[in-house]
Image: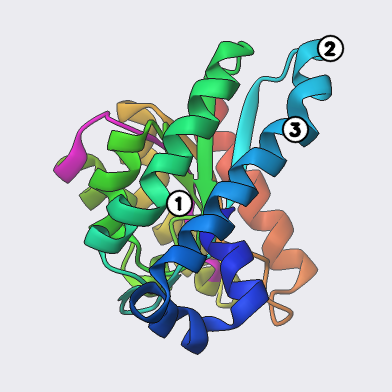
């Protein structure tokens, strides 16, 4: 990812200032990252048929993104466009972005750059797949959207989560239901198995 690598290099706070303090440096870094990704993947995508490409960003917190849509469009969008044109030219049809937190304000900019979908749709950050589908229609697909917090509770809470999210979203399509990030350590094996069993019943109708 572009934001994620800059954050690794500079730190979140430093990067938040750097967009303004040294935009030339930021631009050079982003251009390098795109060039590097294309060079690294050239051989792989030329010899192997990939189904999709997943870009890791992690560029949002619980209350919103860590950069504005305006900054995203100015700095990151051009590199997304370059990378996506390269990937599409190699036959990759689906390009996804992984980011935790509430990134909803950035969705239009991501879509304009050519992104096809997102994960993990973190419910604790008010990322509701049903609302997103209602707001944006079928302009993108989603992976995740099942609240991991429900799995640590009981069967009723798990049933409510599956019924409240999975059932309506399956009818709309473009949705792969899975836990909206790593399964927390307080989820018992029995609860996780029950979640998988109930999800399988809903998906298969058995």
Q: Residue at x 54, y 57 (%)?
A: 28
Q: Position of residue 186 (x, y in %)?
A: 70, 82
Q: Which residues are magenta?
A: 135-148
Circle 3 crowding by C-alpha within 10 Å: few under 14, some 14–19, many from 20: few
Residue 18 sits above or below residue 70 on the image:
below
Q: Residue at x 49, y 22 (%)?
A: 85
In this figure, which residue is indicated by the disc labeled 3? Answer: 39
The secondary element bearing badge 3 is classed as: helix
Which mark is drawn over residue 180?
none
The answer to whether 136 appears left or right of 29 in the picture is left
Q: Position of residue 105 (x, y in %)?
A: 24, 59
Earlier sequence position, callout 1 versus callout 2:
2
Q: Position of residue 57 (x, y in %)?
A: 54, 58
The answer to whether 105 appears left or right of 16 in the picture is left
Is 202 covered by the magenta stretch?
A: no
Q: Quadrant of residue 118?
A: top left
Q: Quadrant of residue 102?
A: bottom left
The secondary element bearing badge 2 is classed as: helix
**Closer mark to the observer between disc 3 and disc 2:** 3
| Mark 3–mark 1 distance (CA, rounded to whole Å) | 42 Å
In this figure, which residue is indicated by the disc labeled 2? Answer: 47
| Mark 3–mark 2 distance (CA, rounded to whole Å) | 14 Å
Circle 2 crowding by C-alpha within 10 Å: few under 14, some 14–19, many from 20: few
């Amino acid at each position: 990812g572009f934001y994620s690598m800059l954050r690794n290099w500079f730190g979140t706070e430093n990067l938040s200032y750097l967009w303004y303090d040294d935009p030339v440096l930021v631009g050079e870094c982003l251009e390098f990252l795109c060039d590097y990704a294309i060079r690294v993947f050239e051989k792989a995508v030329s010899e192997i048929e990939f189904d999709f490409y997943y870009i890791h960003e992690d560029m949002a917190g619980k209350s919103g993104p860590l950069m504005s849509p305006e900054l995203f469009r100015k700095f990151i969008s051009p590199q997304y466009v370059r990378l996506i044109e390269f990937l599409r030219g190699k036959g990759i049809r689906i390009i996804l972005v992984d980011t935790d937190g509430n990134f909803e304000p950035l969705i239009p900019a991501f879509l304009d750059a050519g992104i096809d979908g997102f994960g993990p749709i973190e419910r604790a950050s008010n990322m509701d797949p049903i609302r997103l589908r209602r707001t944006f229609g079928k302009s993108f697909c989603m992976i995740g959207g099942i609240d991991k917090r429900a799995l640590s509770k009981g069967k009723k809470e798990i049933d409510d989560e599956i019924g409240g999210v999975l059932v309506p979203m399956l009818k709309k399509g473009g949705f792969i239901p899975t836990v909206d990030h790593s399964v927390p350590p307080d989820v018992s094996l029995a609860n996780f198995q029950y979640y998988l069993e109930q999800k399988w019943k809903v998906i298969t109708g058995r």
